[in-house]
Image: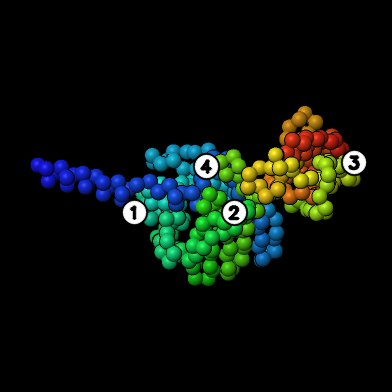
Amino acid sequence: MKKIIIFLLFFILFCRCCYSIDTLSTKYFPLKEGNFWVYNYSHYNPTMNYRVRDDVGAAVIINNHVYYPYHYFRWMYWMTDDLRVDSITGNIVKYNTNGCAWLNNEALIDSLRSRLNDSSKSYDCSSPFVHCNDTSYAVYFSQSLPAKQFLLDMYEELDFKRYAKGIGMISRSSVGQSGETFTLIGCRIDGIVYGDTSLVPVIQISKEIPLHYILFQNFPNPFNPVTKIKFSIPSPSPSKMERGSGGEVMVSLRIYDLPGREVATLVNGQLSPGTYEIEWDASNFASGIYFYKLIAGDFVDTKKMVLMK
């Protein structure tokens, strides 16, 4: 009897070890409602260069699994997949009725639990293997982070994806027919903003450190349909400097219509001290009065501008 009890205890302990929750691997792709990632996107045929944003929507339950709608831009199209990161295997999978039979209506995207040189079968099991070919560290947002890179050899095209722990996908590049690249410039993870999350590039026109915060009047004003907005960011005082910010300041620049509804976000990220300028293209907006509001540290200022078509 004593031997049976010892055997059962050993068996339970063994099962726990085999099926314990893999919280480490899931951190390489923090899939949660409200998280998003902004990338510099480029495509060489045809030539395209702009910023795109991947977003995570509200959770949905399918076949007793919790998935998150993941809205993203790939192959020159906007797409949405229902994704989840399996807490036991560390696999990123998407709901797909044509996926591998052993995955039960799911398709494997990447296995975040992989070690260097590990391989896994991707998508519908007829696709090539995904190889983990790099586990070196990556420096992002002034942090040195553990990272993993995956290579998918699709015969006529090579697809590279790299994830950083606590951040998510930091880069993706396809070498071959499509020739597109994604480079992370900013993100919001669990409510914390890293880098530059604006979809319009903000240009630093002077690195001379101003003494005060200044929001300048836009020029031209009135305008049709493009105007420029300039602002200055001083160095934060040591008492107000956020830990790990490296002297950068969280800056938000948003556009509002006359009733007070937000119509555009031009800047939403951390910026170093200096003077910046950004364009707002109002081609898709009606003539009228608009307001732009700068929030940086404790500084808040709003100015009026007129779109006249």
Label 1 or label 4, whichever lies nearer to me, is: 4
- Earlier-in-chain disc, 2 versus 1: 1
Residue 97 coordinates in the image, percent (x, y):
41, 50
- Location of mark 1 (residue): 102
Instruction: Say if 265 sits above or below 274 in the image.
Output: above
- Location of mark 2 (residue): 143
- Distance, label 2 to label 1, CA atoms, is 38 Å
- Earlier-in-chain disc, 2 versus 3: 2
Label 2 or label 3, whichever lies nearer to me, is: 2
Residue 20 coordinates in the image, percent (x, y):
34, 47
Residue shown at 63%/58% (left/top)?
183
Query: Is 261 in front, or is 77?
Result: 261
- Location of mark 3 (residue): 222
- Earlier-in-chain disc, 3 versus 4: 4
- Location of mark 4 (residue): 32
Residue 114 figure quarter: bottom left
Residue 304 coordinates in the image, percent (x, y):
85, 35
- Earlier-in-chain disc, 2 versus 4: 4
Quadrant placement of the C terminus: top right
Residue shown at 63%/54% (left/top)?
142
- Distance, label 2 to label 3, CA atoms, is 43 Å
How dense is the environment of label 3, judged by Cα within 10 Å: few (below 14), some, or many (20 and up)?
some
- Distance, label 3 to label 4, CA atoms, is 42 Å
Residue flagged by tag 4: what amino acid is it? Lys
Q: Is residue 106 visible?
A: no
At mark 4, the secondary structure is loop
